[in-house]
Amino acid sequence: MKDTLQSAKCLSPRRNTTQAASLDELVSEQLAHFGINADSDYGKALSDTARNLYQAQANVMTLWDITTNTLGSLNKEDRVAYFNAKKFLSFQIAKILDTLQNPFRKTYQSLSSGDNSQGHYPLFDNVTALFSATPVVVRTATYVYACTEWVDDAFQGKEFTHQIYSRLLNPTNISLANAIVDREAGKNASEYMAWNFNSGMAAIDALLSNVLTHGDVLIVSRNVYGGTYQLLHDYFARRNRMDIQVAWFDGYSKEEFVEFMETTREENAARLEKGANMHVYMESPCNPHGYVLDVPAICEEAHKVNALVMLDSTLATPVLHQPLQHENRAARPDYVVHSYTKDICGSGATTAGVVIGENHRMFQSKGDEVNGVKWSETLFWDVYYIKGAFLDSEKAFDVLNGMKTMEQRIISKVINTQVFTEFLAAHPKIRVNSHALDNHPNAELKRKQHKHGWPCPLFTVDMAPANLEREVFTRFFDALEPAFSHQVSIGQTNTIILCPALTSHSEMSKEEQRKAGIELTTMRIAMGTDNVKQLLAHFMLAARHFIDPVVEGFSDAFMSNAEIDELYRKISLHVCEQHYTAVPGIAEILQE
């Protein structure tokens, strides 16, 4: 009885102050709280209903315990049965709520003076939205309170179903957070939580603001997004701001990182001895070349010295790399960042971002402390709660829709990337910087880390061997429209081309650009899902028109038409075979 009572108390309007020792006493307290005469017909009917609800809450908690204890031992047939039985319970509960709608509205209408000035009360109108096949776009700033003690718990972070303000929590936003954790963490999803932001840069800023304290040391991979560089260089590293000592790591391998980390610790020994922390921020694949770093090995080495690792995995998406699914926890980054704006959403119509981290680092109820992390140090309370860079419900819905086609889009981009890079690399006067090429220095790490060894659909190209004058190059580059879109983002369905030195990385000095492998004529290409043969044809036509007159025979060095057709056929079949043969067999699925 005690367990039943404890499970039921959360439904009481006096959940934190109740003195009830039984379900009947809980019912009596509830009626008294709202001033209902228990001996009236209404009071008797309400008592019976409330008693059943308290008992139902206890029964549902028992179902939860049984599910938790038995799910791992059930065969798939029984798990399907468990799911559908619980699904139908949800429909039954929703039906009860919907039944309340008419008498609730009738009572509310009776309070009006008759001039309709009181307006409409929407609470139970929302119940039918539970049956929506897609997440509901909840367009509200505020929410209706249940009672004083429930909303008090909500402000303490102890009542998620009683949301306060959409800047903090919104059902559509939460649906997206759950979806990205499932995709990114897979079987480890229960260990992780996500907070969504209104842009990728807002997510990065929030994460750095949460992790870093004044005077810390931060190791950062050299090739990061230009906006990230600017945020670190112009804000966090400034002595009159956060005075973060940024150490730029030029390597990609475990060995290079170990050596660099030791050097960084020695160079910043004075800071570290005074209590500064050292952490790691990396982007893999990185911008603009698409190189990958040895993420698991770097995480393991960083964790040996208690450094937190933050990974921007935007360009990988959960399709190419799932760093949070590594069997060895030490090999996982502590945080994963995505710019939803790019391939996860894919439409190019929404700006959004997310930070994913272990539960205890992301949220705790006020007053709690888990694994040495206090509630006030979690990302939610420390940053998200107060900065206001939340993701609104409409954008969250756009991203959720985009995620449905993400895998198919990435497969198409992988094919296009491999075809286009091999086509360009076959030309003696075009230099291709992409690990899609088997002989590229970064190709081995890509094969080790990415699903099927697939390449990042972002790479760079330059024509330095052709010795083009700037005017010739710019005329050629401008002529790549409309097949190649001159835009400043990536990860859309159309193929985008730009010059990083003049756009995405223009905040860097010339020296920093050089260190990052960015020349004035470097072209960054973000492959789309469009017809790659059309892209190749347009590229050749632009070269024929603007380059051939100054570099004799330039276009003659391209692959022949028949060679291009064969290259496309070969790569398309290979990538599709990799994908479809990796799908578990029907016998394996039945036995999961």
Image: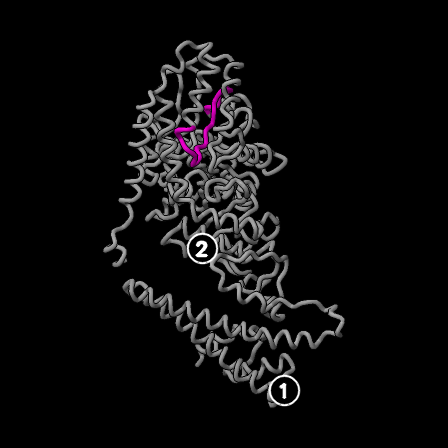
Where residue 537 appears, x then y in whole percent? 41, 24
> Dividing the picture into quarters, in which one does residue 123 lie?
bottom right
Q: Residues within 10 Å of mark 1 (few under 14, many from 20)?
A: some
**Which is nearer the eye, 212 or 431?**
431
Relative to 40, 67 lies left or right:
left
Residue at image location 33% in from the left, 41% down from the top:
451
Dominant SS of magenta comes to: loop
Relative to 255, 48 lies left or right:
right
Q: Earlier in the sequence, mark 1 or mark 2?
A: 1
Number of numbered labels in the structure image? 2
- Give the quadrant of the C terminus: bottom left
Q: Which mark is residue 471?
A: none
Residue 418 sits above or below residue 54 on the image: above
Residue 116 visible in image = yes
Where residue 369 appears, x then y in whole percent? 49, 58
Q: Which mark is residue 371?
A: 2
Helix, strand or loop status at disc 2: loop
Residue 471 on the magenta segment: no
> Dividing the picture into quarters, in which one does residue 262 lie?
top left
Q: Which mark is residue 37?
A: 1
Please state the extent of the stretch shown in magenta in the rendering: 517-534
Separation (CA) of disc 1 from disc 2: 49 Å
- Label 1 sits on what residue type? Asn
Residue 529 on the magenta segment: yes
- Label 2 sits on what residue type? Asn
